[in-house]
Amino acid sequence: MPSVYKPVFVDNSGEKCSTTIYLPALSSANYDSVAGNDIGDNLGNLRIAIAAVTRCNFVKHNLTGVSYADLNEIPADADAQNEIRLRIDYTDNVNGRTGYFTIPAPNLDVFGQTGSDVIDPEEITVAALFTAIETYAVSRDDHPITVQKGVVVGRR
C-alpha cells in the first residue's frame, strides 16, 4: 500500500487547501529517501517541483505518519486563489488505472497558454514537475505512473 503525501497550502484569502499524491510504501529500507524533505528525497523533490508551479504558500507537508511544518503565511500574490487549480492526470504503468490530483493556484504567467486550458508539457517548469511526479510518485496501487496531461481547472 503506498504512502499518502498531503501538502497543505494557504491562498491569498487565507483559505487552506490540500491535495493528495501517492508515494512508494514506506519501509525501513526506503524511509529516508521516500519521507525525506531535502533535495534528492521523494517528498523533498516533489515539494520543490510543486512550489515552482503554485502561487500559494505551504502550511505543512504530511506523509502518512510524518508531518513537516512550513511557512504558513498568506501569500502576497492576489492571484494565489484556491479556486483555480492545475489538474494532473496520470496512468498506472502496470494496470492502466487512471488517477489525478490538483495543485492550487498555478502560476499561469509562467506556463498558461492562450486559448487552451491544457498546459504545455514542454515548458521547463512543467517538464520539471512532470519528471518529479513520474520519478517520485506512484499510483494508489503503489505502481509507477506516467503523467498524461496537465489542465487548468476552476471551482465556483
Image: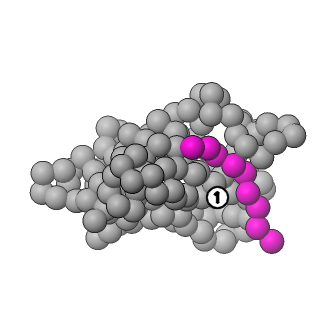
Farthest residue toward the left?
Answer: 28
Q: Which residues are magenta?
A: 148-156
Quadrant of the image occupied by residue 31 = bottom left
Residue of label 1: 104
Q: Is residue 68 left or right of residue 29?
A: right
Q: Is residue 153 left or right of residue 26?
A: right
Q: Nearest the camera: 59 or 28? A: 28
Query: Residue 23 appears at what percent x and percent y?
Result: 35, 55
**Which residue appears at 55% of the width and 66% of the height?**
18
Given the image, on which type of amino acid does mark 1 rest? Pro
59 over 112 or under it: above or below = below
Quadrant showing the C terminus? bottom right
**Which residue appears at 45% of the width and 52% of the height?**
96
Query: Residue 20 appears at what percent x and percent y?
Result: 48, 64
Quadrant of the image occupied by residue 64 = bottom left
Quadrant showing the N terminus? bottom left
